[in-house]
Structure formats: C-alpha cells, structure tokens
Image (tube, rainbow, N blue to C red):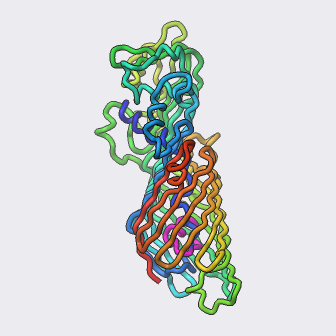
C-alpha cells in the first residue's frame, strides 16, 4: 500500500487546485481547439476555419509550504525534508491539489460562414490532499534511521484526507453565428460530452479524538493510536488500495454519463468589416458554463471503514502496511463499504472573459474561472479553483507570444509565458515566477501540436 499512498501524496503534495489550463490561448481568435473547450461558441468565427489537435497536455503542480523556485529547487527540497521548528514538518495543515489535462486527437471545421462543428477527446485528473500532518509525510521522504521522532511527541490525523478524481470524455460541439453585421457579431455554442469515469477515491481519518505518537522500530515507522475515530477508504472505479492493487490496476468503473457545455460570445469591430473572416475583432466578451453533470460510482471490494477504539490500549499501525494492520487489530472493527453508490460531480465552472485588440496584432485579455460544484457538503466532488488570468499577447496567423499573469485561489499570483509557432504550442503560466521569485509554490507546463488552416 505504501507505494500507492506515496504516489498519491507526490501527485497531491506538489500541486495546486486546478487553474485554467492552456493559459493565454483559450481566449485567442487563433486558439482553435483550446478556445472551443473553454467556450463552444468559439468554434465558429475564428481566424482559422479548420484545425486538428494531435496531442496537448497541461500539468499543474504546487503546494502551500514549499517554494518551487527553479534557481533554488534543491535548497527548497532540503528544507522540506529537514526536521525542526522551522521546517515544513513542524506543520499539520498541508493542503495541496493536482490537475492534469490531456487533450487527445480532436478536430474542428466550419460549415459555410455561420456554423462550425468540433469533435474533441480529453482526459482529466484532479486530486487534493487536505490537512495532512507533514510528520507522517516525512516518513516517505526521509531515511527512518535519521528521523528525529522525539522532536514530535504527538501528531494530528483528524480530518486528513486524499481525494482523487479522473475521467475521460468525447465531445461534439456546435457553434453558430446568430447575428452579424459590419460591426457586431453574436455567437452561441453547445457541447454534448460522453463522460467515462476512471476513478473517484477518498481515503482519510474522520472524527478522531485521542493521541497519536510516532515510533521508530528498525526501518519502520509505527503509528501508536490511543483514542477513538474512523479511517475510511471509499473507492469507485480503478482499484488502487490494498496489497494486491498492482495486479488489479485496470479499469473497473461502470460510471458514465452525458454532460453539456454552453456558451455565448459577442464581438465588436470599430470599423465596418466587409471581410470579417480576415479581420480580428477590436473587442470580445464571452461567457460559458461547462461540465454540468455528475457521475454515479459503486464502491469496490477494498472500500472499508475502520472504527478504532483504543482508549485503554494503543493500536500500533505500521505506515508501510497501514491497511494490513487495521485488518488484523482486535481493537479495530471493520465495516465493508463494498457495493454502495455515491455521486461525484464534475468540475462545474462558470467562465467569463473579455479581450481587446490594443494595436494591430497586440491584444490583452482578462478571464475568470469560478467553481460551481460544492466541495463542502459533497466530499467526492471534483472542483476547479477560482482563478483570474490577465494575458497581454502578440498574435498573427502563424506566430503568437503570450504573457499570462494568473491569480489563483490558495496559490496567489504567478507569471508565465507561452509561444505558438506554426503547429507547436509551448508555455507555462508560472515559469517567470519560478525563475525569479523565491516564494512561488506552484509550477505549470503545457505543450501541444495542433494544425490549423484558413
């Protein structure tokens, strides 16, 4: 179990709540597929009439404790794994999130001058860790023989959890120009998506009251638990928990659904435009509502609730084999959660943006992403972070340069850059901050190959 738990911690602990992926490209009239996944109304009326995306990805990594400055990354990790009052391991409130967005083979094409169709394929993964006591995490990073466990007489585990959601999708989009004259254009669009759930899994401690101490025994770290509380594993989809999880790492999910995106865009041109297909707008405003839907999962055989009652005699749990020791202890009662159904909402979001052409090929856009799915009462829901991105940029048909400045819930402000040359797209919403700031706790990178034609 340790390597599975370690994988999830690595994914969650060095990551952030999901920002806007492909920052800087989504609002562009040259954005193609990137614009369509942001707002289906953008399928029509762009500067290219057809296009194909071969493969694109956007990965975001961060945490709320460790600076990720590229100039001092080794120093950051050294401090991260160092015990003592000033280290990250003196904290018990480690919060983190993870987002991976993979845009697979996709295409769009215009039908006449007022309609367009797009077909997209996509895989997304979103994970978060909340309230993790970093002293537990230390056992996965440090040599146990060098750990100073005496420096931490007790630790906190109540309300710690890890949540992982992943799903794939195939979407069909339609965009249409419903009104147009020489200065004004109104576009609408809708996307219908077939969603296949891959996983929705939550593991964590709840309602614990008592004391927990770490103890070193040879090469193992033992968690001595005195008190009462629950440790639960609720897993739907891929089975990732248990000692035999490696041999069962296959798609088991029957969770699937249909969801929709809907959007609107308005464009304004100062001068009359007899040939608007070749002239970018002077101002654009757009609004879209995306991922409106949810998945219903059935819990797998490894879904269990462990109720600990060790007020008199403590329970010794080896962190390398946590579930095994819970299964064997006489002071822990088990309740199987197999076969129960639960609901996981998709990351529903409201997207609003405005874009202005400042001078010929120079633009600046401002976009906001607002999470609409509820995570406080619905603990299995996937959710995006509230975020804002300001992007000055230079764009022509075959070349673009972007400077996204993002402000995201929990992470703060990051500055990045992006480049589009022919079919190649590369960039990062954080790279400038990673290079020149010592306090940036996030790192992002994206790249893609997408061909577009007029």
Residue 334 percent coordinates (x, y): 46, 23
For residue 184, side relative to residue 136 (left or right): right
- Which residue shows up at 33% across the image and 36% down it? 245
Displayed quadrant of residue 303: top left
What type of secondary structure mainly makes up the magenta span?
helix
- Which residue shows up at 57% across the image and 60% down it? 404
Q: Is residue 52 visible?
A: no
For the record, the magenta segment spans 29-42
In the displayed image of the protein, which residue is found farthest to the bottom? Answer: 274
Residue 241 percent coordinates (x, y): 39, 34
- Residue situated in front as seen by the camera: 249 or 396: 396
Displayed quadrant of residue 406: bottom right
| Picture layout, residue 320 above or below residue 67 | above
| Picture layout, residue 158 above or below residue 300 | above
Pick the quarter of the image with the N terminus: top left
Q: Is residue 135 visible?
A: yes
- Residue situated in front as seen by the camera: 378 or 57: 57
- Which residue shows up at 62% across the image and 74% down it? 188
Q: Tell whether position 294 is magenta.
A: no
């Amino acid at each position: 179990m340790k390597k599975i738990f370690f994988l999830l911690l690595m994914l969650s602990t060095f990551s952030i709540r999901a920002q806007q992926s492909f920052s800087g490209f989504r609002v562009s009239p040259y954005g193609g597929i990137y614009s369509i996944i942001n707002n289906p109304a953008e399928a029509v009326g762009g500067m290219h009439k057809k296009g194909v995306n071969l493969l694109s990805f956007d990965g975001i990594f961060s945490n709320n404790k460790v600076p990720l400055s590229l100039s001092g990354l080794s120093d950051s990790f050294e401090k991260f794994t160092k015990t003592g009052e000033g280290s990250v391991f003196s904290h018990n409130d480690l919060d983190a999130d993870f987002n991976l967005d993979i845009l697979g083979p996709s295409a769009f094409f215009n039908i006449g001058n007022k309609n367009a169709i797009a077909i997209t394929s996509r895989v997304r993964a979103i994970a978060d860790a909340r309230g993790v006591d970093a002293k537990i995490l230390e056992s996965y990073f440090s040599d146990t023989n060098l750990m100073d466990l005496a420096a931490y007489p007790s630790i906190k585990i109540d309300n710690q959890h890890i949540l992982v959601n992943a799903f794939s999708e195939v979407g069909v989009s339609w965009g249409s120009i419903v009104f147009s004259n020489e200065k004004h254009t109104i576009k609408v669009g809708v996307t219908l998506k077939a969603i296949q759930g891959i996983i929705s899994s939550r593991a964590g401690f709840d309602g614990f009251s008592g004391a927990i101490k770490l103890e070193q025994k040879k090469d193992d770290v033992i968690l001595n638990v005195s008190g009462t509380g629950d440790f639960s594993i609720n897993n739907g989809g891929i089975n990732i928990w248990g000692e035999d999880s490696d041999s069962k790492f296959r798609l088991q999910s029957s969770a699937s659904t249909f969801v929709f995106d809907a959007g609107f865009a308005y464009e304004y041109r100062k001068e009359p435009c007899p040939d608007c297909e070749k002239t970018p707008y002077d101002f654009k405003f757009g609004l879209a509502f995306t991922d409106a839907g949810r998945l219903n999962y059935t819990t797998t055989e490894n879904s269990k609730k462990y109720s600990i009652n060790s007020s008199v005699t403590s329970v010794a749990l080896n962190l390398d084999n946590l579930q095994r020791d819970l299964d064997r202890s006489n002071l822990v009662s088990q309740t199987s959660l197999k076969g129960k159904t639960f609901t996981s909402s998709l990351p529903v979001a409201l997207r609003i943006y405005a874009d202005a052409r400042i001078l010929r090929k120079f633009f600046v856009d401002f976009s906001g992403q607002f999470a609409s799915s509820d995570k406080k009462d619905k603990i299995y829901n996937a959710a995006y972070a509230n975020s804002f991105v300001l992007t000055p940029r230079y764009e022509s048909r075959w070349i673009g340069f972007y400077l996204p400045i993002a402000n995201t819930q929990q992470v703060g402000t990051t500055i990045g850059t992006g480049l589009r040359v022919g079919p190649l797209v590369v960039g990062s919403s954080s790279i400038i901050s990673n290079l020149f700031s010592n306090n940036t706790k996030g790192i992002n990178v994206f790249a893609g190959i997408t061909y577009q034609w007029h």
